[in-house]
């Protein structure tokens, strides 16, 4: 413990110089990794304005008492003492099922419009038009990359709007620094879903507008399972990056029957192991020490057949 009157805990090894020591109530949650992940449905909820604990939730018994490390990119462990190594396919076991058609990971982003009441009732697709948002991709090395603003421009009809936004998302993701996503495809669908409210004899049906974005990671640099994309849907004005208008959504923290979410729609056939399972990670340097006969960033190249 440390501080005035030893009132707060210390961070392990002061985060080893590779992270920041922060109060537990300052740690992001909601749509931020690790997020509100619903294991029963396999999806990450999208929260509206819940990046930090606020109000009474920020003043519980451990308020300003418990600390933890938030590691810099490329580092992990409770004290941020280890560097992360690249992950990749096992060159001798590249696909989980070679008898079937190759499948790459597909992620489904479903966004429900809030409507005039905020619970999705009587919402319309046009609520998305003219608004902007962004997508954040977290690599397997814990590096975060956020796209430029993505604007939902109305192109005369829903089909034209879907095509234009799909192309815009593909280009934005493939333009992220370091070619962290070397190839992907995107498909946008705008439409309406049925919404059930109440129970028994009091059940009522309504419609809710949605925008569904399907992203498939098809490049060699994103083989295997990737972290779920995060939707930057809160308004971000002058002095904030990226500058977006935001989307008015029914979010995971609203308590409605229908919530916006990100989920894995299709699991990749490719695997993704630390150092390709053909080497050991040097946690001091973050480099893979490949076994004999294997070379490459994640030991994915076979240099000898013997």
Image (tube, helix red, strand yellow):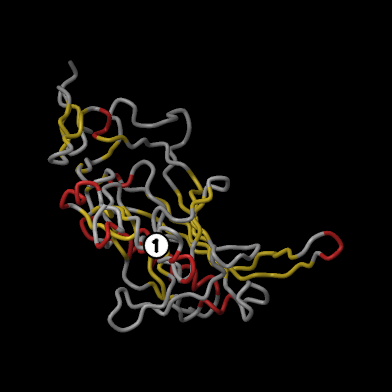
Q: Quadrant of the C terminus?
A: top left
- Camera-nearest residue between 250 and 302: 250
Q: Where is residue 94 in the image (x, y as percent from the top left)?
A: 34, 31
Kindly identify which residue carries mark 1: 63
- Camera-nearest residue between 163 and 40: 40
Q: What element carries label 1?
A: loop
Q: In which quarter of the image is residue 168?
A: bottom left
Q: Quadrant of residue 170?
A: bottom left
Q: Is residue 145 above or below residue 222?
A: below
Instruction: Please give left or right for residue 126 compared with residue 271 in the image.
Output: right
Instruction: Please give left or right for residue 7 compared with residue 118 in the image.
Output: left
Q: In which quarter of the image is residue 179?
A: bottom left
Q: Where is residue 238 in the image (x, y as percent from the top left)?
A: 31, 84
Q: In this view, does 229 lie above or below 265?
A: below
Q: Is residue 275 above or below residue 262?
A: above
The structure residue drawn at horizontal position 46% and vertical position 42%, both measured from the top left corner, is: 267
Q: Residues within 10 Å of mark 1 (few under 14, many from 20)?
A: some
Q: In this view, does 16 lie above or below 90?
A: below
Q: Where is residue 256 in the image (x, y as percent from the top left)?
A: 63, 65
Q: Residue furthest bottom?
A: 238
The structure residue drawn at horizontal position 52% and vertical position 80%, both measured from the top left corner, is: 156
Q: Where is residue 242 in the image (x, y as percent from the top left)?
A: 31, 74
Q: Residue furthest right?
A: 201
The structure residue drawn at horizontal position 48% and vertical position 75%, both measured from the top left corner, is: 247
């Amino acid at each position: 413990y440390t501080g005035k009157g030893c009132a707060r805990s210390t961070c392990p090894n002061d985060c080893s110089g590779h992270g920041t020591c922060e109060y537990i109530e300052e740690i992001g949650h909601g749509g931020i990794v690790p997020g509100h992940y619903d294991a029963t449905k396999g999806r990450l909820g999208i929260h509206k304005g819940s990046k930090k604990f606020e109000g009474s939730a920020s003043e519980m018994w451990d308020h300003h008492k418990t600390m933890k490390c938030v590691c810099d990119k490329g580092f992990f462990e409770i004290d941020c003492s280890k560097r992360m190594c690249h992950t990749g396919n096992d060159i001798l076991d590249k696909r989980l099922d070679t008898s079937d058609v190759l499948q790459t990971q597909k992620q489904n982003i479903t966004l429900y419009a809030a409507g005039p009441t905020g619970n999705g009732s009587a919402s319309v697709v046009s609520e998305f038009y003219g608004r902007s948002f962004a997508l954040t991709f977290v690599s397997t090395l814990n590096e975060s990359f956020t796209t430029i603003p993505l604007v939902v421009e109305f192109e005369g009809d829903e089909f034209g709007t879907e095509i234009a936004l799909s192309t815009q998302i593909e280009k934005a993701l493939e333009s992220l620094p370091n070619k962290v996503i070397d190839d992907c495809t995107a498909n946008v669908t705008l439409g309406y879903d049925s919404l059930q409210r109440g129970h028994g004899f009091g059940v009522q049906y309504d419609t809710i507008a949605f925008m569904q974005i399907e992203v498939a990671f098809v490049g060699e640099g994103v083989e295997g399972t990737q972290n779920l994309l995060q939707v930057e849907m809160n308004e971000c004005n002058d002095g904030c990056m990226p500058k977006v208008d935001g989307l008015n959504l029914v979010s995971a923290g609203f308590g409605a029957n229908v919530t916006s979410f990100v989920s894995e729609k299709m699991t990749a056939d490719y695997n993704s192991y630390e150092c390709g399972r053909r080497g050991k990670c040097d946690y001091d340097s973050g480099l893979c020490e490949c076994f004999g006969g294997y070379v490459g960033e994640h030991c994915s190249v076979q240099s000898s057949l013997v």
